[in-house]
Amino acid sequence: MDGAKARVLICDDDPLLLELMEFRLRAKGYEVIKAVDGAEALEKAQQDAPDVVVLDAMMPKADGLEVLARIKCDPALSDTPVIMLTARKGQKDIVSALDKGADDYLVKPFIPEELLARLARLIARNSGKR
């Protein structure tokens, strides 16, 4: 998968963070799909088949860990890499997300360039599996 054409689903209930992430991702050539709550995130993941998902843990309708578990249990989506991007930084939160199948975990506030580097790594790794 060419990184310039990779499709990234970003799920966060903070409109400013969504806008910032969309701007940074589009500037790097990614196609961006946005969701503002867990239910919309699941719907868009199933409908748009993103190459990678960036998921907040604390969202309305379904929290990020529930969305993560449902993505990883769905045969059509289970190989999709998921980065948790959340303010939750406790050891229990991080271990729980990784146990549920998160491919990476980044704590807010975050460095946008670090997120971009992690996305590129996951997309490259996953494109080798296809």
Image (spheres, rainbow, N blue to C red):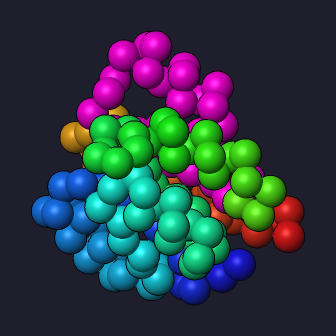
Residue 115 seen in the current view: no
Q: Quadrant of residue 104?
A: top right
Q: What residue is shown at x 52% (from left), y 53% (from top)?
A: 118
> Percent x, y for residue 105?
48, 37
Residue occupying image coordinates x 48% and y 24%:
94
**Image-based side of 15 in relation to 92, left or right:** left
Specify whether 127 is left or right of 33: right
Q: Is residue 123 visible?
A: yes
Q: Quadrant of the N terminus?
A: bottom right
Compared to residue 5, the image places residue 39 above or below, namely above
- In this rendering, would 76 be left or right of 108? right
54 drawn magenta: no
Q: Nearer the viewer, residue 119 or 69?
A: 69
Residue 115, by quadrant, is bottom left
- Residue at the left extreme of this rendering: 16
Report x, y in % for residue 110: 28, 44
- Write the start and end of the magenta stretch as one range: 78-106
Asked whether 88 or 129 is in front, the reply is 88
